[in-house]
Image (cartoon, rainbow, N blue to C red):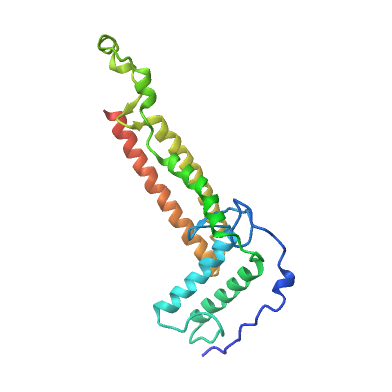
Amino acid sequence: MIDAQTLEAPMETATIRKARRWSPGACVWCGDTDAVEVFRNEPRCATCREHETVVDEARKFMGMYGLRPIGGTLQSDDEEEYEHRRAARDARRVLNDIRLAEQPDPALVRKALRPRAAAVVEEHAPSRPSASRASSPRTSASRAASPRTAEPVKTGAVDVSEIQTRALALLDQLSTIDAQLALVAEQSGLAARARRSDLDKQKATILRTLAALEKARLSATSN
């Protein structure tokens, strides 16, 4: 059995912590603006997400094997359990050190998230055929005179140019993820493993989306 080590209370956290205030677009926990993304329905920066993931992995490990919950001491039955407990302790210590002295109002946080959510919905919404309807003649004589080849390259609500634009954007994201995977490939530890797992999931999602876009493009051009 590995010797127990009592978790020391952060006595000087209040003096070390910087006096920062939350602003819209920043991390709700520490106020940082580095790579802020929605995590558990809150805007969280890359540092916070990484340490929260480490704590989650340790909590899942303890629950999977029916072990004592994390916190308190590092007393463990084997090396793997000890590593999870130590990593969770270190991650929690960092989170406590960088936490804002005054947490923002949840209502203000939700209000700041609304424009981002609306932008995401608008980006992924299907294109509206209103422009093509407005440009097409309304009289029956004009409809008979205009050939079908003059219409834009569309099949129903599918816009080939929009598919290509989205595919190019996804390919850029894929290149960024591959670069990040290359950086953490040689790193060890629970934090690096959690980061690789997160990047792999993002890559798999992008690949599935690209496959769906390619299928839609082929279907549109074949008709």
Image point (35%, 28%), residue name: 129
* Quadrant in which the C terminus is drawn: top left
6 or 20, which lies in front?
20
Q: Position of residue 38 (x, y in %)?
A: 51, 55
Work out whether 76 lies above or below 88.
below
51 or 178, which lies in front?
51
Residue lying furthest right = 15
Q: Position of residue 77 (x, y in %)?
A: 48, 87
Q: Position of residue 32 (x, y in %)?
A: 64, 57
166 or 11, which lies in front?
11
Total numbered badges shown on the rendered structure: 0
Image point (39%, 39%), residue name: 125
17 left or right of 2? right
Work out whether 44 lies above or below 116.
below
110 left or right of 157? right
Q: Where is residue 209 in the image (x, y as percent from the top left)?
A: 38, 45
Image point (53%, 78%), residue name: 85
182 left or right of 144? right
Q: In which quarter of the image is residue 142?
A: top left
